[in-house]
Image (tube, rainbow, N blue to C red):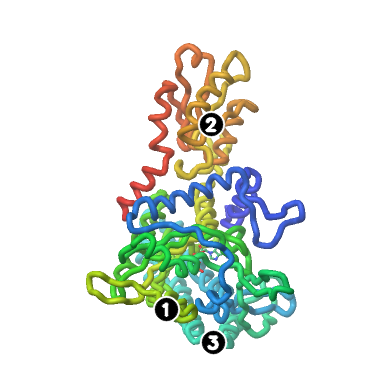
Amino acid sequence: MAQEDVFKKIVAHCKEYGFVFPSSDIYDGLGAVYDYGQNGVELKNNIKQYWWQSMVLLHDNIVGIDSAIFMHPTIWKASGHVDAFNDPLIDNRDSKKRYRADVLIEDQIAKYEEKADKEVAKGRKRFKEAFDEAQFRATNPRVLDYMAKRDALHERFAAALEANDLEELRQIIIDEEIVCPISGTRNWTDVRQFNLMFATEMGSTADGASKIYLRPETAQGIFVNYLNVQKTGRMKLPFGIAQIGKAFRNEIVARQFIFRMREFEQMEMQFFVKPGTELQWFETWKKTRMAWHQALGFGQENYRFHDHEKLAHYANAAADIEFKMPFGFKEVEGVHSRTNFDLSQHAKFSGRKIEYFDPETNESYTPYVIETSIGVDRMFLSVMCHSYEEQTLEGGETRVVLHLPAALAPTKLAVLPLVKKDGLPEKAREIVNDLKFHFNTQYDEKDSIGKRYRRQDAVGTPYCVTVDHDTLTDDCVTLRDRDTMEQQRVRIDSLRALLEDKVSLTSLLRRGAQIG
Ligand code: GAP
């Protein structure tokens, strides 16, 4: 099945099984805004817990905060967002559709890669066991041609971004013969900058309302609380402040479902370090964050680092962690070395001294910052994309199964009475009422047992137990594994011990710590 079709199925599955709904659905939705349903909110909360615990619980020098969405408007002047939080936009005169010029070019770069990959796939089919991918890539003229085109375009694009040259961005689009996906024409306008912040007003006009912004990142709430936390927590460098919260961006090209939203959630951590040590910490955090992702077991080959060509003026290193989505490798998280830019700017604009007194050297300085910034929704999407599978079983029957990591699954255990009589529902409820104090346990008695298994597979429940007539006498149930569909007879009083470690975050956190 084409990857595009797989993605459409995942989007439909998210709606059908209560993971993600379009916002304001009965009013036909609101562009690039989504609501999480009964299963989605559980999965999302588990992702947030996994992140929070790995940051705050496992590091004794990282603490959390929860700052307000509304902040003093000068913050966004100081941070540079008022003047420079822009996207380069281009319009197609025929379709009247607006696009991000940089995204059009990035897609073109990806197309060259896809073409090269297709040649590799053809080679693999042709040469079968004798196929040597590395040699093929190094010698096949078509692959070499596509990769040369990709590299040349990449270099030209990076130079245009570096120079902030909007005319050159347009020229690249013309030279590459990029067409509007709607009209199919190359009738492009000039490229213009567009600020992404949402503005609103605080206070009544009579009081003199002031223009404020919905925060476009949670990070600034951390920077402006640096002094509060450092002093009240008597924190010593290096230390970090973590936060999970909503962010808002007026994305013009909002697409790919919850990949690019106008209202989304971020999990950000600012790690304050002594100047001069930042690049070492940058490497440490890259490794730690990659380990966090890989502990989920989605396969190392599905992740890669992408080092930034164009560094923001305040950064001295930046890398993205990309995950292989059905529409290609895409950024899920950024790790940025932001120097002392933000704290210095806030010191300048607020008139406060924002420094750290180092008791070891007896000097005061402005700490440098390593930031790790991940979108909850993008993480959610990567988990869904990797977990979704349409399986053909022996006998030709099919099932849709979500292979969610057990610790992230909305429901850990479904308890199913074989029939709705003979005391089986009561026995099943007894089990639920005991285990629900330990992990998310659901009771389900509707439809045949086969249909109930399928329903649980489709929402990613890792374990089901069936209560049958024998249960009433032997106190045993049939435990079914979602992925292998294997069944075993186990004692009811052993269920908690059998499952708790498998479905709790603990083993996931341990795995992440070991890889890191
Ligand atoms: N404080 C740094 C910062 O905000 P960013 O690269 O703009 O950096 C960080 O955003 C992460 O937030 C991204 O890697 C992505 O996961 C998520 N993100 C950014 N814009 C988003 C959007 N419009 N919709 C969903 N997630 C978004």
Which quarter of the picture shows residue 228?
Answer: bottom left
Q: Which residue is pictured at 47% across the width and 35% down the height?
A: 439
Mark 3 closeness class: few <14, some 14–19, many ≥20 residues within 10 Å: some
Q: Which residue is pictured at 65% across the width and 48% down the height?
A: 15
Residue nearest the viewer, comparing 378 with 240:
240
Mark 1 closeness class: few <14, some 14–19, many ≥20 residues within 10 Å: many
Which amino acid type corresponds to the residue marked 1 in the rendered image? Answer: Ser
Task: Indicate which disc residue 344 carries.
Answer: 1
- Residue that carries the numbered disc 2 in the rendered image: 414
* Mark sitting earlier along the chain (3/1): 3
Tell me the element at label 1: helix
Is residue 191 shown above or below 414? below
Is residue 478 shown above or below 190? above
Q: CA distance from mark 3 to mark 1?
A: 28 Å
- Residue that carries the numbered disc 3 in the rendered image: 165
* Mark sitting earlier along the chain (1/2): 1
* Mark sitting earlier along the chain (2/3): 3
Residue 41 at x, y percent in the picture: 57, 47
Tell me the element at label 2: strand
